């Protein structure tokens, strides 16, 4: 914990924050260090806020692992329903992609074994 009371060990890496910010802006846009630092602080605090709520839910249910559904429930509980709906769709697409990837890998492995 620093002298100003903020725990800087829980910040997202500034390079990742800057990359995401740049991707949302026109190519020739410049982002000040102060803006990057501000967004880094905000998103890190937001993630901590949501994760804390999700963790509390897991603790009440005597579970140790936070799932995507726990995060979505926490977002709904904390008043971020609009974001939770979008993330629910993204989570479903991600899981679908993971399943396809695993299936393709399995099918390649099966073909490779049959060729031997």
Image: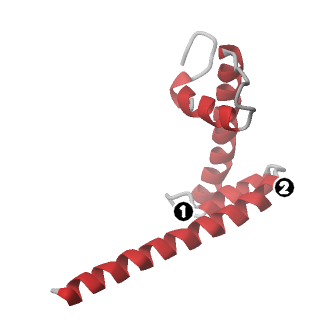
Check the image and report above or below for 61 versus 28: below
Of 26 and 110, nearer the camera is: 26
Dot 2 crowding, Cα within 10 Å, few <14, some 14–19, many 20+: few
Check the image and report above or below for 69 versus 99: above
In the figure, residue 70 lies in which quadrant?
Answer: bottom right
Pointer 2: what residue? 82
Residue at 21%, 85% (x, y): give it.
113
Q: Does label 1 or label 2 sit earlier along the sequence?
A: 1
Give how far across and how far down residue 66 sits, in percent. Answer: 56, 57
Which image quadrant: the C terminus?
Answer: bottom left
> Coloring scheme of the render?
secondary structure
Of 111 and 59, nearer the camera is: 111
Q: How many marks?
A: 2
Question: Which residue is situated farthest in the bottom direction here?
Answer: 114
Distance from the alpha carbon under mark 1 to that under mark 2: 28 Å
Task: Please name which of the two marks, 1 or 2, marks the residue nearer to the observer.
Answer: 2
Disc 2 element: helix
Of 83 and 59, nearer the camera is: 83
Which image quadrant: the N terminus?
Answer: top right
Give how far across and how far down residue 19 sits, in percent. Answer: 60, 33
Check the image and report above or below for 41 versus 59: above
56 with respect to 73 (left or right): left
Dot 1 crowding, Cα within 10 Å, few <14, some 14–19, many 20+: few
Disc 1 element: loop
Give how far across and how far down residue 74 sits, in percent. Answer: 72, 54
Q: Which mark is residue 62?
A: 1
104 with respect to 66 (left or right): left
In the figure, residue 40 lies in which quadrant?
Answer: top right
């Amino acid at each position: 914990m620093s002298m100003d009371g903020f725990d800087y060990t829980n910040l997202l890496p500034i390079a990742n924050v800057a990359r995401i910010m740049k991707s949302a802006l026109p190519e020739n846009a410049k982002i000040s260090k102060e803006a990057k630092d501000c967004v880094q602080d905000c998103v890190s605090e937001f993630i901590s806020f949501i994760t804390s709520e999700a963790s509390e839910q897991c603790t009440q249910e005597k579970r140790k692992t936070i799932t995507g559904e726990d995060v979505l429930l926490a977002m709904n509980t904390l008043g971020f329903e609009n974001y939770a709906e979008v993330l629910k769709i993204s989570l479903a697409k991600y899981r679908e992609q993971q399943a396809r990837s695993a299936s393709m890998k399995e099918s390649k492995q099966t073909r490779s074994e049959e060729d031997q």
